Amino acid sequence: MNSLPQELEVWYLIPAIRRELANLFISEFNLNQKQVSKILGITEGAVSQYLSSKRGNELKFNKKEIEEIKKTAKKIISDEKNSREHFYKLCIKLRGTESLCKLHKKHDKSVNKNCDLCNC
């Protein structure tokens, strides 16, 4: 599959971020699935699938990336009305990260090993 980095964001990055945020909101902020679904703008069923790793499970973040996600989770909790803006800014930060770049190379064999398209 020849894929653009933007396609990977839609197919893998956004679902993986939702997975991590859903887990954080429930485990660290004691929210329930209904509250998480409202914050993330998704159904409760989708939240359940993220929590059980049925969605968004292929992309694994490294420690540095997880820390960025945790910072954003705190921002979202303290400023819920701007949750989409915080989510968007997180997506921008995680573009071109090592984890996404590795996934791109795994799925697209045409990507050169020395590819710097994502600047990671």
Image (cartoon, rainbow, N blue to C red):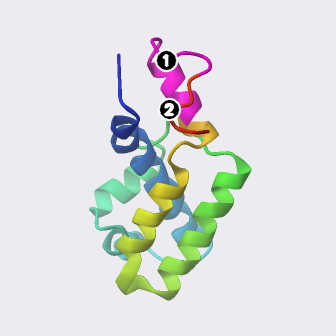
Residue 102 inside the magenta-drawn segment: yes
Residue visible at 55% across and 70% down? 72
Q: Where is residue 53 in the image (x, y as percent from the top left)?
A: 48, 44
If the image is split into quadrants, where does the N terminus sit? top left
Q: Is residue 61 left or right of residue 89?
A: right
Point out the tag, 2 or 1, that comes first from the N-terminus. Answer: 1
Using the image as rendered, state which of residue 80 and residue 116 is in the foreground.
116
Name which residue type carries label 1. Answer: Val
Residue visible at 62% across and 67% down? 70
The circle on residue 119 is none
The circle on residue 111 is 1
Q: Where is residue 4 in the image (x, y as percent from the top left)?
A: 36, 30
Q: Is residue 56 left or right of residue 115?
A: left
Residue visible at 38% across and 59% down? 47
Residue 79 inside the magenta-drawn segment: no
- The crowd level at tag 2 (other Cα within 10 Å; few <14, some 14-19, many 20+) is few
Asked if residue 51 can be seen in this view, the reply is no
Picture layout, residue 7 above or below residue 87: above
How far apart in space, not on screen, are marks 2 and 1 (Cα)? 9 Å
Residue visible at 45% across and 20% down? 107
Marks 2,1: beta carbons within 8 A: yes
Using the image as rendered, state which of residue 71 and residue 48 is in the foreground.
71
If the image is split into quadrants, where does the C terminus sit? top right
Give the magenta-colored segment's residue range: 101-114
Residue 102 position by quadrant: top right
In this rendering, the label closer to the viewer, 2 or 1? 2
Q: Position of residue 52 (x, y in %)?
A: 47, 48
Using the image as rendered, state which of residue 116 and residue 95 is in the foreground.
116
Pointer 2 residue = 117
Name which residue type carries label 2. Answer: Leu
